[in-house]
Image (tube, grey):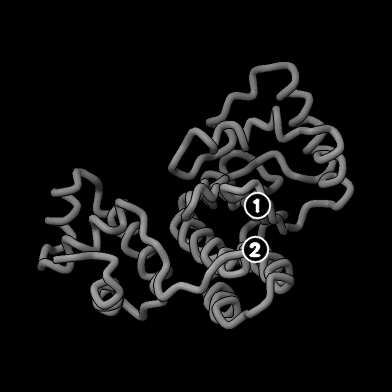
Amino acid sequence: MGFEAAQPKLDMVLRRLEQSDALEALQDFITELRDAFGVNHLVYHWVNGNGDQYGCGTYDPAWVQRYLDQGYLRIDPVVLGCFQRFHPVDWKQLDWSSKAARAFQKEAIAYGVGNQGYSIPIRGPNGQFALFTVSHSCDDEAWAEFCVSSRRDLILVAHFFNQKALEFEPGRLPEQGHALSPREVDAMTLLAVGYSRAQAAKALEISEHTLRVYIESARFKLGALNTTHAVARALSRGLIVV
């Protein structure tokens, strides 16, 4: 099975997502995002510092209930592996060696989760931890091609979706600007003082591709039209100081 070209659909869904004002709407949007990427499933789940949880996604409700009833959160290699990571991870890179993990994987596939997966761990303010996950049924070659072509969009969409969900977090106070990660602050600060992207990447000892991911993530958080706009907003909100 081939994957659909996602960009035009993504742009449309994200524009509408930005204007949403209700938590309930996120379920509809995650379904639309799944269709835009042309995959079997998309799932988003967060836990904040107080232990409050929220999730939405396209898994079979029977699997979700089974997962909760069996307490699979304790053995799920995706959750356990991503909690120790800061970067996106292909499920094949995780530890599925235990008997319990293999049985869990077999059951998940039987419920239609898919044999392939890619999860993006997100750490927000006040101890919030979230996962944005895409899963699908296909061979390794097709999945590798999808991950290469869609990785950037998935990362940006994941952070954008998480930021929107945080607006509806219980007890959350309105704020002027969304917190940038330390790496996003570093990237935006260097650009603000006049570094080129190549110079900024060299200073941070990262690739230009990785730098671009940080810049685009910051741009989405700031609701900016382009990089220059993002730098200006970050400066005006006191998120970076030069």
- Residue sitting at 50 percent across and 66 percent down? 160
- Distance in Å between CA atoms under marks 2 and 1: 15 Å
Verify CB contact (< 8 Å) between mark 2 and mark 1.
no
- Residue type beneath disc 2: Pro
Mark 2 or mark 1, earlier in chain: 1
Could you say where residue 238 lies in the image, as x and y percent from the top left? 27, 70
- Residue sitting at 31 percent across and 52 percent down? 182
Task: Report the residue marked by disc 2.
Answer: 170
Whether residue 131 is visible to the viewer of this picture, yes or no, is no
Quarter in which the N terminus is drawn:
bottom right
Could you say where residue 36 lies in the image, as x and y percent from the top left? 63, 68
Could you say where residue 181 lies in the image, as x and y percent from the top left? 36, 54
Q: Is residue 125 left or right of residue 33?
A: left
Q: Which mark is residue 195?
A: none
Quarter in which the C terminus is drawn:
bottom left
Task: Report the residue marked by disc 1.
Answer: 45
Q: Mark 1: which secondary structure?
A: strand
Reply above or below: 128 against 229.
above
- Residue sitting at 31 percent across and 63 percent down? 215
Could you say where residue 97 lies in the image, as x and y percent from the top left? 64, 18
* Residue 241 vs residue 186, the one in the foreground: 241
Q: Mark 2: which secondary structure?
A: loop
On the image, which quarter does residue 168 sit in?
bottom right
- Residue type beneath disc 1: His
On the image, which quarter does residue 66 sit in?
top right
Mark 2: give few (<14), some (14-19) or many (20+) Cα within 10 Å. Answer: few
* Residue 233 vs residue 120, the one in the foreground: 233
On the image, which quarter does residue 9 sit in?
bottom right
- Residue sitting at 49 percent across and 60 percent down? 159
Q: Is residue 213 left or right of residue 76?
A: left
Residue occupying the far right of the picture: 62
